[in-house]
Image (tube, grey):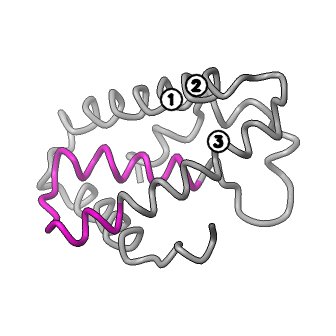
Amino acid sequence: MRLLVALGCGMMLSIAPAVAQQQGPDILKIWQQFSVSNSLASRCAKPDNEKLTKFLANYQIISTHAAHRLKQITPEWSPARIDMVMAEHYSNIDRTISEILIEETCDSQRTKEALQRFDAQADMDLSKSR
């Protein structure tokens, strides 16, 4: 899917490629997927308040874990720098989504398929992972 491939090589994910090959899910990739969903849904979906609240709660949990992982990878970085890097990366994702939507539009099949991830992420119960 072009939407996801276009976002595959982000600055944050290139910080420690050797670390990314560890066992288990890569929280930075998961954060990136949530960020794509957030950006896309903000432009192309009108979720009800309950679904949006659940998604944002899950996104906050994932963001917290991603920030913690960045701190492990780069212990010399301050919390402010980690926040800045994550904000810049999200901004890049958001800009890329805008560019893709010029070609794809919100009504395209690929966009609709990508929005299904938003629904799945909203329906996850991540409250136990805290």
> Which residue, given by chain and number where applicable, does mark 3 sit on?
67
Secondary element at image label 2? helix
Q: In this view, does 109 lie to the left or right of 12?
A: left
Q: Mark 2 points at which residue?
A: 85
Q: Give the range drawn in magenta.
A: 30-55
Q: Nearer the viewer, mark 1 or mark 3?
A: 3
Using the image, tell me which numbered label, if any, was put on residue 37. Answer: none
Magenta part, dominant SS:
helix
Residue 76 occupies which quadrant of the picture?
top right
Disc nearer the start of the sequence (1/3): 3
Foreground label between 2 and 1: 2
Magenta segment includes 48: yes
Which of the 4 image quarters holds residue 27? bottom right
Residue 100 location in percent, x, y?
28, 36
Q: What residue type is labelled 1?
A: His
Q: In which quarter of the image is the C terminus?
A: bottom right
State yes or no: residue 118 in magenta: no
Name the amino acid type tagged 3.
Answer: Ala
Instruction: Give me the disc on residue 89.
Output: 1
Asked which secondary structure carries label 3, the reply is helix
Q: Which amino acid, by three-letter code, is at mark 2?
A: Val
Towards the viewer: 114 or 41: 41
Q: In this view, does 10 lie above or below 88?
A: below
Which residue: 43% across, 46% down? 35
